[in-house]
Amino acid sequence: MPSKKIQHILESQQFNRHWLLTQFFPEVARMKRLVEVKGVSSALSDKTVCLLFYEPSTRTRISFEQAAQKLGAKIASTENASEFSSAIKGESLADTIRVINSLKFDAVVIRSDMEGGAVEAANVSQIPIINAGDAAGQHPTQALLDVYTIFEHFKRLDNLKVALVGDLKNGRTTRSLAYLLGKFKKIHFDLVAPAAFQMKQDILDYFDRHNISHKRTKSLESVADQVDVVYLTRLQKERLKKNSKVNGNGVRLNDKVMAILNKKSIILHPLPRSDGFNEL
Ligand code: ASP
């Protein structure tokens, strides 16, 4: 991380290669061991964390709760905050965040239903805001977890070929992962998606600005024998018009793809898998 202390976690671009390799990964390994050996820690025993989830979540919310509790923090949590919080009475996100600040929480984990919602929250917050997914924007904590998982397996993040597969247009995890892995050397991305679901221009511009090698394709089969990482994602049905017809051919990990997949490669999926593309 840059010399300044982390205030908020909002988007993957805020992290750099040096910080990931020299501080973040060793610290994750240390905490992993600590939890494996002792089960719990008192590192956050004087802290209270507020979890504010406006969009559905299973893994992210439960694992944030679990992590906070294992580190000794107390939590206050609302799921479906668009209905179960004062949002339904017309309260703005900014006002909700101001109130949470005044109640002396130590951090807010937010899943916003608006792209840019976490940034909006951070603009009025004196306590750290952690973006746990902002609509089709970003999911930086998922990306941190993903790069750690890849690093743990390959013991490196440079010089890897990565296929990002599925609904790259609406999926926030692939967007955050692209920004984060793009910080490493000699990375190549195969962007595998049906034409209507290809990666948005902001990421392609980022690749071009930083000379990051990438190729767009509709077929996982065409790149499967060359890639080190296959990162599958589901169709983001909730972001589509009702009854949209979608063809998942080409983004499916079927027997044909499995037969030619580089045997040293790894397969990741942020979950949930679903029947939209039937990708896994
Ligand atoms: N769980 C991930 C997310 O919240 C992936 C997904 O929903 O497709 O973005």
Image (cartoon, rainbow, N blue to C red):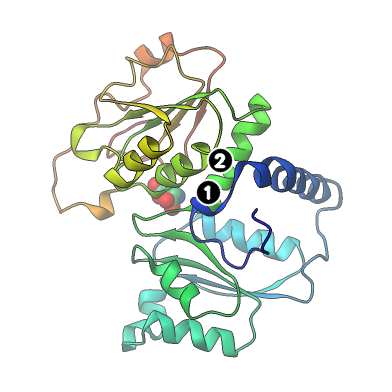
Horizontal arrangement in the rendering, residue 208 relative to residue 131 (left or right)? left
**For residue 192, which quarter of the picture?**
top left
**How far across and down, in percent of the image, does residue 138 sit?**
42, 54
Q: Residue at x 53, y 49 (%)?
A: 142
Horizontal arrangement in the rendering, residue 34 relative to residue 275 (left or right)? right
Q: Residue at x 26, y 49 (%)?
A: 237
Q: 72 above or below 191?
A: below
For disc 1, the neighbor class at 10 Å (few under 14, some 14 to 19, many from 20) is many
Mark 2 and mark 1 in contact (Cβ < 8 Å)?
yes
| Image quadrant containing the C terminus | top left
Q: 248 above or below 239?
A: above
**For residue 149, which quarter of the picture?**
top right
- Give the numbered dot on residue 146: 2
Kind of residue at disc 1: Gln
**How far across and down, in percent of the image, does residue 91 sit?**
36, 87
Kind of residue at disc 2: Asp
Horizontal arrangement in the rendering, residue 8 relative to residue 193 (left or right)? right
Q: Total marks drawn?
A: 2
Q: Secondary structure at mark 1?
A: helix
Query: Marks 1 and 2, how far apart in space?
Result: 6 Å
In-front residue for pair 154/244: 154
Q: Secondary structure at mark 2?
A: helix
Disc 1: residue Cβ within 8 A of ligand 1's nearest atom:
yes
In-front residue for pair 178/81: 178
- Give the numbered dot on residue 142: 1
Q: Residue at x 63, y 81 (%)?
A: 105
**For residue 247, which quarter of the picture?**
top left
